[in-house]
Image: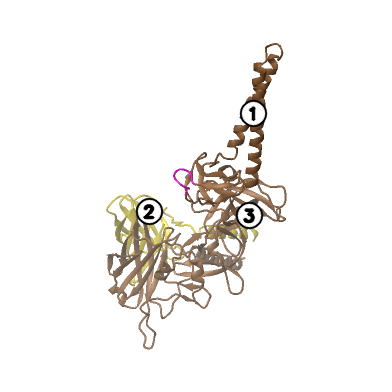
Chain colours: A brown, B yellow
Amino acid sequence: MVRVFGIGLSLLTVLGLAASAHEGHDHGAPPPPVSASIAPRFDASSEAFELVGVLRDGKLIFHLDRFIGNSPVSDAEIEVETPAGPQKAKAVGGGSYQIEAPFAGKPGSHDLIVTVTSKGEIDMLTAALVVAPDEPGKAKPGATDLAQRLPDGAVFVPKPSQRILGLANLKVEHAAHPQVSILPGRIVPDPNASGVVQASVAGRLSAPPGGFKRLGTRVKAGDVLAIVQPAISAADLTAQAQQMRELDQQVSLVSRRLERFRQIAAGSVTRAQIEDTELELAGLQARRAAVETFQRQPERLLAPVDGVLAAANVIAGQMADPNATLFQIVDPARFWVEALSYAGVVAETGGSAVLPDGRVLRLAFEGAGLSDRNQAVPLHFSISSAEAGLRLGQLVSVHMVTGQAHEGLAVPRASVIRAANGAMLVYEQSNPERFVPREVRIEPLDAERMLVVYGLEAGRRIVTTGAELLHQVR
Amino acid sequence: MRKFLTILAFFSALSLAQAHGQRVGPRGGALVHVGNNHVELVTAEKQVEIFISDAFDKPLAAKGYKALAILAVDGKSVRVTLEPSPDGGKLIGVAPEALPAKVKGAVQLTGVDGKTSTGRIN
């Protein structure tokens, strides 16, 4: 029993020690790489900052960045407690600072306490700078440190190179995300904020007072956009002339008859007969006048809605066909997106659309058609986020929320890289200058993000911007 | 035997629970790992005290040690040098201003052999 207790006690001690061993240190992160071609360096991190110190030419250069985001901190004050006493570091721009470090000329481990103050935030970081003794035949560090892939597959990228590559990171969190389907779509006009202008008769176009409006002009409903002078064909002119002559003949006949009725003594012709003849004459005269002016009045083409001229197919003197679209007016603030759902998935929720240039539009569901179009159900979405520079017919990828939630870690699309062997990778920033590729299983999430469902733990820092460049390091 | 295993499991769980948090020493101060030792930092108004123990938390005499504490007070840093107390049980120092009960900073401990090591308090 005593022996068993003894073993138990040893185990307990080991457990206790192992558990409390790394207080005040990084959480079990592997040490930075040691390579003869890389200058002596140390790194230290806190919840707010991460710091890299590099010894070169008797100077200790500090690179200070945000722990989350990896953005350089340029406005900090750094005070270093060196073996030779406290020293204030001089800012050299771009999140870098330096001190003279004669103490580091001596090989060995030099303990440092670095006090970082930035915008009311204060942090103390502890580190040890290890300087190896000079040995004959040993390679000396180069003038600059080069990014390199390490034998274990991790990538070492010195801070100055990280800034050139623009590497940024993000802390991933576990959450339930609704699933999305990706559909092909295009930009269409909002039917309540767009219109076309067509001539109702064939005719010759002429400019309104002030001339034709140029493309992109903002117009109001009722503005005159063009004038159509109706064209009369030879056959129509002959028929019109014939009709006018017939009417002239009838007018003279009826007017003679009326005259006769008036001359005949009262009693032989009733009053009603005279009145009927008067009405008949007035009717014939009105028809004669109408035939004369018919097809001679120009048609004014008016803007049906407020908006911007999106298309104009007009030129002075051009013959316009009836039903031909002369102008198209759209309201650029009120575009819609039409998507085709081949799987018949219709979720009456919003979604997002990605433009070919990577911009993202927020979408709100408007309606879905019941009839097939090319074996797909058309879906309409209105664009709820204001976005300039959209044009009609532009192709987009619509990411529609289907309502089923999936658990995982959301990472930006730019974080996920396809390796040469086809595996999907994300890069984890395990140390300030060390990036470890993690093979992951992913699912599409939305226009901007992918969902990591396997291969990565929550709380890790994942490279977002610059992951593709990082992957090229050999 | 069963009782013993239960106790063992309880203590293991307790130790693991502390793994990623700051440990609290017997005097209520932050207990951190500095070099091969454990150091407990206790503050009371301007007074700063450091108690040194070995890796198994067995108290060590402060004679021959000295320490430097850099502590964050109201967004700026305060430097306190500590010397052994007359009774040799701890290192003591006086801060230029009153310190909060829970303090953040770093400690540099210089051992009897002149070697220094540092620890972070957060």
Specify the segment rendered in magenta. Answer: A207-213
Q: Name the image quarter holding residue A399.
A: bottom right
Q: Is residue A316 left or right of residue B76?
A: right
Q: Are marks 2 and 3 in contact (CB under 8 Å)?
A: no
Quick one: which residue is furthest to the top in this view? Answer: A267
Instruction: Identify the residue position indicated by label 2 in the image.
Output: B103
Chain containing the residue with disc 2: B
Along the line of sight, which residue is nearer the eye, A405 or A297?
Answer: A297
The quarter of the rendered structure image containing the N terminus of chain A is bottom right
Q: Residue at x 51, y 69 (%)?
A: A468
Instruction: Identify the residue position indicated by label 1 in the image.
Output: A252
What's the residue type where badge 2 is placed? Val
Q: Nearer the viewer, mark 1 or mark 2?
A: 1
**Can residue B111 be seen in this snapshot?**
no
**How many residues crowd around disc 1 within 10 Å: few (fewer than 14), some, or many (20 or more)?**
few
Q: Position of residue A216 (x, y in %)?
A: 48, 50
**How many residues crowd around disc 2 within 10 Å: few (fewer than 14), some, or many (20 or more)?**
some
What's the residue type where badge 1 is placed? Ser
Q: Position of residue A65 (x, y in %)?
A: 40, 62
Q: Position of residue A131 (x, y in %)?
A: 36, 77
Secondary-structure class at tag 3? strand
What's the residue type where badge 3 is placed? Val
Indicate yes or no whether the magenta region holds residue A255. no
Depicted A425 relative to depicted A244: above or below:
below
| Labels 1 and 2 within one chain | no
